[in-house]
Image (cartoon, grey):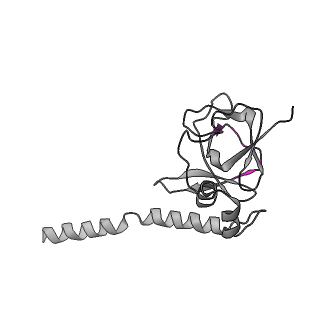
Amino acid sequence: MMGKKIALIAVLFASCIGTSQTEKEELAENKKAETTYPVEKTDAEWRAELTDMEYYVLRKAATENSFSSDLLNNKEKGTYTCAGCGAALFRSEHKFKSGTGWPSFDREIEGMVAYDVDYKIGYARTEEHCASCGGHLGHVFNDGPSNTTGKRHCINGIALDFVPDEK
C-alpha cells in the first residue's frame, strides 16, 4: 500500500515538471509572432540579405561566441546600427568594457530598442530587439555601471554595424 502511494506521488510530481516553462516559452513565441515592425520582410528576403551568422542571430535569436566580434574593442566615435535594417540603436559614448565578451552599452537610443521576455535558459531574461525590424540583439541586465544607468545591454556584435561620426 505504501509503495502505491509513493508511486502515485512520483507520477503526479513528474507530470508537473516543465509544464509552466513550456507554457511561458509558447506565450513568448506567440507574442513575438503577433508583433509587427515597420520593416517587414519574408524569411527568404532576410536569408538573401544577411550573412548566415547575421541571419542566425538576428532572425533566430542565436548568440554569437563571446570575444568573437570585431566591434568588441572598437573605440571610434559613432553610431551602432542594426545589421538587418540600418536603424540607429546605440551611441559609442554609451559603450563600456564589461569583460563579458560582447559589446556592452549602458543605454540605447531612446525608442529604437524593443524588449520582450525570454525563458530559453530556464528563467526570465529581458531580450532586446531592433524596434524597426524585430531583429534579436541580445539581452539587458541590471549589472551595468552604477555611476550611469546600472544597465548592461549585452549585444551580439554580429547584429550591429558601425557608422563612424564624420570628422
Q: Closer to the camera, 80 or 3?
A: 80
Residue 59 pos. (x, y %) = 63, 60
On screen, residue 123 versus residue 87, left or right, reads left
Q: Is residue 18 above or below residue 137?
A: below
Q: Closer to the camera, 32 or 19?
A: 32
Q: Closer to the camera, 162 or 2?
A: 162
Q: Closer to the camera, 20 or 136?
A: 136
* Residue extending farthest left: 1
The quadrant of the image that shows the N terminus is: bottom left
Residue 71 pos. (x, y %) = 66, 39
* Residue extending farthest right: 167
The quadrant of the image that shows the C terminus is: top right
Q: Is residue 37 above or below residue 143?
A: below
On screen, residue 3 versus residue 155, left or right, reads left
Q: Main secondary structure of the magenta part?
A: loop
The number of discs equals 0
Residue at 66% x, 50% y: name it.
Answer: 159
Residue 60 pos. (x, y %) = 59, 60
- Is 112 colored magenta in this rendering? yes
Residue 76 pos. (x, y %) = 74, 32
- Is 23 colored magenta in this rendering? no
On screen, residue 142 versus residue 93, left or right, reads left
Stretch in magenta: 103-114
